[in-house]
Amino acid sequence: MSDLQNYIKKRKAKDPEFSKNYDSGYDQFKIGVMLKQARLDAGITQEELATKLHTKKTAISRIENHAEDIKLSTLERFAEATGKRLTLTIG
């Protein structure tokens, strides 16, 4: 386990607020990374994707970098525009 992972584990054990915020923040970060990767896999720029979704490049950047409170309909449109299919799992 790396020093960073050790620190996070210890901090989460001591600080419930940190733990809660870390987990939700990580999930949002992970969604943004997956969306960006889908766009890159499709070989399209943020500008091209924005045109497909009838929005602005800044909106695509915001989604990829801060995917908090993103609507399910937006995720579906994003996936469709990148040639992907949205799959949702609750575990």
Image (cartoon, rainbow, N blue to C red):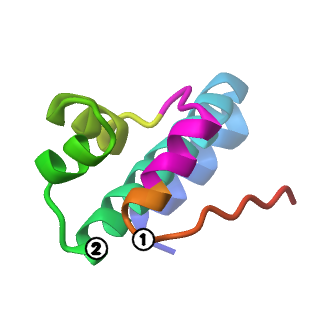
- Which residue lies at the image location 61% right of the left edge and 52% below the top edge? 9
Q: Nearer the viewer, residue 29 or 88?
A: 88
Whichever of callouts 1 and 2 sits on the residue coming sooner in the sequence is 2
- Which residue lies at the image location 56% right of the left edge and 26% below the top edge? 69
Provide the residue span drawn in magenta.
68-78
Q: Nearer the viewer, residue 82 or 90?
A: 82
> Which structural element holds mark 2?
helix
In whole angstroms, how far apart are the C-alphas of marks 1 and 2? 7 Å
Rendering quarter of residue 18: top right
Using a 10 Å C-alpha cutoff, classify the residue at mark 2 as few (fewer than 14 neighbours), some (14 to 19) or many (20 or more).
Answer: some
Residue corresponding to mark 2: 42
Residue corresponding to mark 1: 83
Q: Nearer the viewer, residue 60 or 80?
A: 80
Amino acid type assigned to the residue bearing label 1 in the image: Gly
Rendering quarter of residue 71: top right
Rendered location of residue 58, percent (x, y) = 18, 30
Amino acid type assigned to the residue bearing label 2 in the image: Ala
Q: On the rendered structure, is 38 left or right of 7? A: left
> Which structural element holds mark 1?
loop
Residue at the outermost right position? 91
Q: On the rendered structure, is 63 left or right of 90? A: left
Q: Is residue 48 above or below residue 65?
A: below
